[in-house]
């Protein structure tokens, strides 16, 4: 199989400096932005994945060589070698003020310029892969993810995680927007995920279905310790340091297929099973990361309370998800930045 090639037409320049902040007027800021724009690669339309070609196995799986070609495409175009990969959830990856915008010396790749990459179709998911420094830690950040309800198979939704692995990432940090089931949770709270219930998996849908390549991981990976206890401990320390223990919890997340929100009967069933928050992502990414031997951590931003009363006229909607993500952006940026620093320091010890 030959690796995909894409012509790159853009120019590059660094986009930031590390140092003390200096107050500037609008004209100065515009001048600085024009002088140091972020590097953005603009390429020809990507090569689409063809399930009938030799790039796949039985039409439902990406080969190791294909993922390797995508990783090499990225490595050939950036000097940064990140060990931490971040996936930004709904409402946390918009066009302004998001975590990806906080990266310095960044290079971004619109998904449509990356070979074989899907493209997001959901409002609130911008669609860029960004390499840069969060503080002084090199990271790669997915500004927009892919969902099963968009029509993508789960293996393709989780494919970027395998790309991260072959780029050299060892730690995956994933965030999501979720509906709160636990009565103690309030809109705007943060839930550190300690475990999950994979309802899609119960229905026979798993990102690891299809032929297994041992170069990624074993045929039957253990998932009982999917959410790393040490990183969860660090996250709790960060919450204490930020004085946000009152809005931070630890609980069980469940994934559903979507895109429709859950019925009252479904929410009551999930609550009876011990679920604290429910959403439409993350689990297949974490399963793929664990299959690859990556350390995984995830948290939910509680963007709405799940409706459990038949007399209620409330209806969950995507707009409230986006709005709450924007409101919590400053807190989440600091939370992730501090956690990334702790992980990096722990790696160096």
Image (cartoon, rainbow, N blue to C red):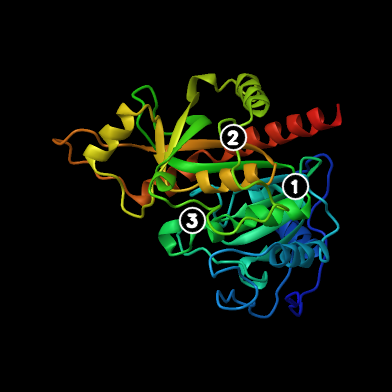
Residue 39 falls in image quadrant: bottom right
Q: Quadrant of the N terminus?
A: bottom right
Residue marked by disc 1: 169
> Which one is closest to the eye, mark 3 or mark 2?
2
Residue 229 falls in image quadrant: top right
Q: Residue at x 64, y 22 (%)?
A: 233
In the displayed orientation, state which residue is furthest to the left.
Answer: 311
Query: Where in the figure is residue 166, as x and y percent of width and height?
Result: 75, 55
Q: Residue at x 33, y 24 (%)?
A: 183
Can residue 105 be seen here? The reply is no
Residue 332 falls in image quadrant: top right
Nearer the observer, 142 or 213: 213
Few, some or many residues within 10 Å of mark 3 (<14, 14–19, 20+): many
Q: Of the residues under marks 3 and 2, which one precedes in the sequence?
A: 3
Element type at mark 3: loop
Residue marked by disc 2: 226
Q: Is residue 228 left or right of residue 179?
A: right
Q: Residue at x 61, y 71 (%)?
A: 112
Q: Is residue 186 left or right of residue 83?
A: left
Query: Where in the figure is residue 72, as x and y percent of width and height?
Result: 79, 64
Query: Where in the figure is residue 2, as x and y percent of width and height?
Result: 75, 77
Few, some or many residues within 10 Å of mark 2 (<14, 14–19, 20+): many
């Amino acid at each position: 199989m030959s690796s995909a090639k894409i012509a790159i037409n853009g120019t590059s320049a660094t986009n930031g400096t590390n140092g003390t902040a200096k107050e500037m007027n609008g004209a100065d800021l515009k001048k600085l932005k024009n002088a140091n724009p972020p590097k953005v690669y603009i390429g020809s339309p990507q090569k689409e994945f063809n399930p009938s070609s030799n790039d796949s196995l039985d039409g439902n799986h990406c080969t190791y060589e294909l993922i390797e070609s995508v990783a090499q495409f990225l490595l050939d175009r950036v000097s940064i070698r990140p060990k931490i990969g971040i996936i930004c959830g709904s409402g946390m990856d918009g066009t302004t003020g998001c975590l990806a915008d906080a990266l310095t010396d960044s290079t971004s790749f619109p998904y449509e310029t990356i070979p074989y990459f899907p493209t997001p179709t959901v409002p609130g998911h911008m669609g860029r892969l960004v390499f840069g420094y969060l503080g002084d830690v090199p990271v790669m950040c997915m500004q927009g993810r892919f969902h099963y309800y968009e029509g993508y198979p789960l293996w393709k939704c989780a494919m970027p995680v395998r790309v991260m692995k072959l780029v050299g990432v060892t730690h995956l940090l994933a965030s999501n927007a979720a509906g709160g089931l636990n009565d103690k949770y309030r809109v705007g709270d943060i839930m550190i995920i300690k475990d999950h219930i994979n309802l899609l998996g119960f229905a026979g849908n798993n990102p690891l279905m299809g032929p297994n390549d041992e170069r990624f991981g074993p045929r039957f990976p253990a998932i009982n310790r999917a959410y790393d206890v040490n990183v969860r401990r660090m996250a709790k320390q960060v919450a204490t340091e930020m004085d946000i223990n009152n809005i931070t919890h630890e609980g069980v997340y469940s994934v559903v297929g979507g895109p429709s929100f859950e019925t009252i009967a479904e929410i009551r069933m999930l609550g009876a099973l011990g679920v604290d928050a429910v959403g439409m992502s993350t689990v297949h990414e974490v399963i793929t990361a664990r299959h690859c031997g990556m350390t995984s951590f995830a948290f939910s931003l509680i963007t709405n309370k799940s409706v459990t009363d038949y007399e209620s006229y409330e209806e969950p909607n995507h707009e409230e998800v986006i709005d709450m993500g924007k409101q919590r952006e400053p807190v989440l940026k600091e939370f992730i930045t501090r956690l990334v620093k702790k992980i990096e320091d722990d790696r160096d010890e």
